[in-house]
Amino acid sequence: MPESQQLQLALIQMDITIGEPDTNFARLEKLLQEAVQNDPKPDVIVFPEMWNTGYALTEIEQLADSNGERTRSFLSGFAKANSVNIIGGSIADKKDDRVLNTIYAFDREGAEIAEYSKIHLFRLMDEEKFLHSGDRLGRFELEGVPAGAMICYDIRFPELARKLALDGARILFVPAEWPHPRLHHWRTLLMARAIENQMYVVSCNRVGTSGTTDFFGHSMVIDPWGEVLVEGDESEAILRATIDLEEVVRVRAKIPVFEDRRPHLY
């Protein structure tokens, strides 16, 4: 990590073809190649939730990536070949007889640095009928800096983000498939998580239509003051932002929220 702790981010706000992993792998590979051609080259690339299959839940056992093997090989190889950190969105990941919604992340050497399976399953999309929830927090280090991961619906649970912040996270990654008509909720919850925890929030949402559900994108990078540094629209795009993780230290010193907590009362 450079002394300034600056990171160049690239968010791949992509469309996803439901139930067609081969199509989605090809689309992602094309967008990844485009992302690393930028000057300056990104330090970190992020993409959306369930990008390999979409919400093809009735077929998910057949479509899910067994132990994430295809995804891990692909993302690890790309990270190493291009010397870039990858927060690999999330995938339908089959482990034994269970399917989970899992993030895999890799460092510049292609080494796996995180595996996090979504803790809170979203009943409005019937996740609990087809998927199993994770049972571990998404804590990891990104180039020596504590970081955290949550997936989509998880952001409605402020205690999860607070726990990651208390454990030292300076940056929170949030892959998602968040649809209309809840754009206001998406933007408000993400900004709240950034403000109340005084950390960067990097959210990457999909675009496009799946069945009767429209996904609005609006991927965002939000700083520890809650200011939006970049925000997408509803089209497929690669969004870019520069963040300085020392800003987290400055904000936490200026308004000492964590020192002023009184957890014995709540």
Image (tube, rainbow, N blue to C red):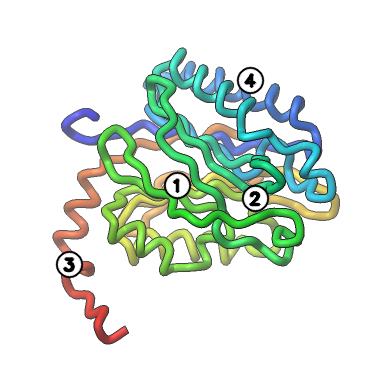
Can you tell which mark lies on residue 55? none
Earlier in the chain: of badge 2 and badge 4, it is 4
Disc 3 marks which amino acid?
Answer: Pro
Q: CA distance from mark 3 to mark 1?
A: 23 Å
Element marked by disc 4: helix
Q: Residues within 10 Å of mark 1 (few under 14, many from 20)?
A: many
Indicate the amino acid at tag 2: Glu
Whether label 2 touches label 4, CB < 8 Å = no
Q: Secondary structure at mark 2?
A: loop
**204 in relation to 107, above or below:** below
Three-letter code for the amino acid on which mark 4 is drawn = Lys
Q: Which residue corresponds to mark 1?
A: 173
Residue at the top extreme? Answer: 81
Image height check: is 79 above or below 7?
above
* Quarter that holds the N terminus: top left
Identify whether 184 is placed above or below 4: below
Can residue 233 be seen by looking at this rendering?
A: no
Marks 2/3 in contact by CB < 8 Å: the verdict is no
* Residue at which label 2 appears: 177
Disc 3: which residue: 256
Helix, strand or loop under label 1: strand
Residue 193, image x, y percentages: 41, 62
Of callouts 2 and 3, the N-terminal one: 2
Q: Earlier in the sequence, mark 3 or mark 4?
A: 4
Separation of residues labelled 2 and 3 (CA atoms): 34 Å
Residue 30: numbered disc: 4
- Residue 88: horizontal and vertical position, in percent? 53, 35
Task: Return the disc, 1 or 4, that comes first in the chain's sequence.
Answer: 4
Residue 51: x %, y % from top left: 66, 38
Secondary structure beneath label 3: loop
The type of residue carrying mark 1 is Phe
